[in-house]
Amino acid sequence: MDYYVDTASTTGFVNWANVAPFEPERRERQRSPLSNEVFTPISGAPNFFDAVSGPLAPTAKLSRNPPKESFTPIASEAKEIHPQNLVENSGGKTTEINNLAKQRVRLMAARYASGVESSEMVARLEILNRRLLEKSPRVSTAQIQALEDAAGELARARQVREERRKRLGIGV
Amino acid sequence: MSLFLYPKQKHVRKLKPRLFKNYRTYKRYLQTEFFRVCVYCRQPDSSAPNLNFGADHYRPKSVPRFASLVCSYSNLYYCCGSCNSRKTAYWPFDEKAGPYIVNPCEHEMASHLRFDASSGRVEWRSPHGKHTEELLQLNDPLSIQYRLNTTIIVKALQKEIDEQKAEMVEVENLYKEGKITLVDYEAERKIIEHEILGFTKTMQSQTGDLPLPKIKGQKLGLNLTSP
């Protein structure tokens, strides 16, 4: 019976056993991205930022403007996008008013804390006051309209009353 | 007539609603609690349709240590949109020193702020009152003019109601004296009553005296007020 005799040297066996077959070679491991030397151009380390593929490629940055699709979005996609835009647009004025009000509060607090009223502070406060009243007036047009309507009703009722007095001879 | 007048005594809350998840649910209770006027500027919510009134967190909910008071009824006040947007998340850094925005439950409002009916201005009587007036812009020219006009209109409405009532008596006397027929009397009486009702409603809406529907004690079998 013939036997197969392995004649390969067993001297390096221990060394190979310490290295897992899937592990990169030691030299390459020494050049790992965690090592500081990769950041020094003198070391000749690969520039990871130029790599566009593979495990060393950097994560691509998300573009702020989503790519324009050549196809028309379906209804569900449209619903996802449009309400957000609408909320941003409608809340614009409110946000502006809130910002103005916050700036005013901060300025007033600073004035109170310092105890000194500088001319610059007064001027800035005056500007904010005016802008806030322009953007968010304390009296609405509906309130003014309500008063005007009441005045109109009063004038009409007085006229009716005068006519009645003449017709019935009251106070003659 | 208490139009724009600040209360002389501290307000003691009468309603005790149960704890709600959403603080906006308290708006209905606050409206009744504070007689449908903004606690800061004394503007009635009925003076015009669709006025933006809501619940104001006196101790701002955005300040971390007051976050637990988001739905606390005692921290909520009935407030107009103008005052609420100007107040923002104001809270004095030094609580002892202030200055505070005065509120009807913790301060005697009249000792800090006073409405002058002749000028239409809100005059301050204390540093807290001054701060409140300044922060909420209570004396902007349009507000002053509006308060003056409202006062004039309300007085004119009251005068017209009184004159209509006097005229009703005179028409009745004419009927009793036989100078007008029953049909004429009834027709005139209906017209005058209709006028009086309309002007009373307009005046109440301007002064904030328009009655509110009663708050329900229960809804779907749940108690809405705490014992």
Image (tube, coloured by chain):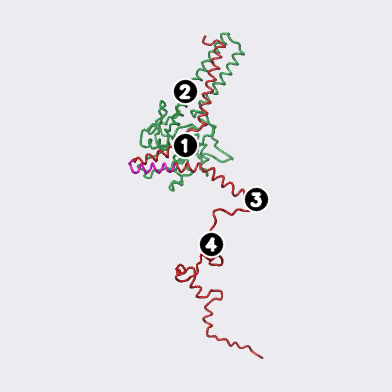
Chain colours: A red, B green
What's the distance in space between the residues labelled 2 and 1, CA to CA? 30 Å
Asked if labels 1 and 2 touch by Cβ distance under 8 angstroms, the answer is no
Residue highlighted by disc 1: A134
Confirm whether residue B54 shows in the render.
yes
The residue to which callout 2 is attached is B155
Front residue of this view, candidates B225 and B24:
B24
Residue A59 circle label: 4
* Quarter assignment of residue B74: top left
Query: Disc 4 marks which amino acid?
Result: Thr
Are the residues under badges 3 and 1 in a single subunit? Answer: yes
User: Residues under labels 4 and 1: Cα distance?
Assistant: 48 Å
Give SS at disc 1: helix
Mark number displayed over residue A74: 3
Which image quarter is the N terminus of chain B in? top left
Do the residues indicated by labels 3 and 2 lie within the same chain of the protein?
no
Cα separation between marks 4 and 3: 30 Å
**Subunit of mark 4?**
A
CA separation in Å, label 3 and label 1: 42 Å
Q: Which amino acid type is marked by label 3? A: Ile
In this rendering, the count of numbered labels is 4
Q: Position of residue A83 (x, y in %)?
A: 58, 46
